[in-house]
Image (spheres, rainbow, N blue to C red):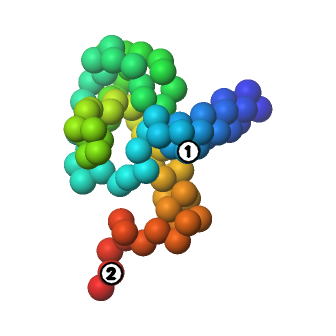
Amino acid sequence: MESQGRDAALRLSVRERIRHGRLPLLRPEQVIAGYGSGRLCAACDRPITDAQTEYEVEDCASGSALCFHSACHGVWQRECAAASAGRGDQSNSSTA
């Protein structure tokens, strides 16, 4: 149960960060993964240790790098997809 509470809190935090512009609403064109560098995760504000996987993406609007834990990156992308679907944004989906 404690894990579910943390997951819900992370989703809520990411949603709020998107809403307030602290995290962009985007699907990155490129994701770079590697060992953690000690930088803070853009979703949870905790350091990404060298024992963890770090995902890095570029915020196209600011040009700055955003770093995430693997799980935090997944939550951010799911929240971006949900927010885009909720407002009817089709700009990031492919059409055939």
Residue that carries the numbered disc 2 in the rendered image = 95
Residue 10 image offset from top left, x and y in percent: 60, 34
Question: Which-is-in-front pick, marks 2 and 1?
Answer: 1
Rendered-image quadrant of the N terminus: top right
Instruction: State left or right for residue 53 relative to residue 71.
Output: left
Residue 17 image offset from top left, x and y in percent: 53, 37
What type is the residue that disc 1 sits on? Arg
Rendered-image quadrant of the C terminus: bottom left
Residue that carries the numbered disc 1 in the rendered image = 19
Q: Nearer the viewer, residue 48 or 76?
A: 76
Q: Nearer the viewer, residue 90 or 73?
A: 90
Question: From this viewpoint, is residue 72 visible?
Answer: no
What type is the residue that disc 2 sits on? Thr
In the displayed structure, 95 sits above or below 85; it is below
Label 2 element class: loop
As measured in the structure, the alpha-carbon distance from the residue carrying label 2 to the one carrying label 1 is 27 Å
In the displayed structure, 78 sits above or below 55; it is below
- Sequence-first disc among 2 and 1: 1
Residue at 55%, 59% (x, y): give it: 82
Label 1 element class: helix
Residue 41 numbered mark, or none: none
Q: Using the rendered view, name the quadrant where residue 53 is placed.
A: top left
Residue at 47%, 40% (x, y): give it: 21
Q: Using the rendered view, name the quadrant where residue 19 is placed.
A: top right
Residue at 22%, 38% (x, y): give it: 63
Instruction: State left or right for residue 75 relative to residue 39.
Output: right
Residue 15 image offset from top left, x and y in percent: 58, 43
In the displayed structure, 24 sits above or below 67; it is below
Instruction: State left or right for residue 52 relative to residue 7.
Output: left
Q: Residues within 10 Å of mark 2 (few under 14, many from 20)?
A: few
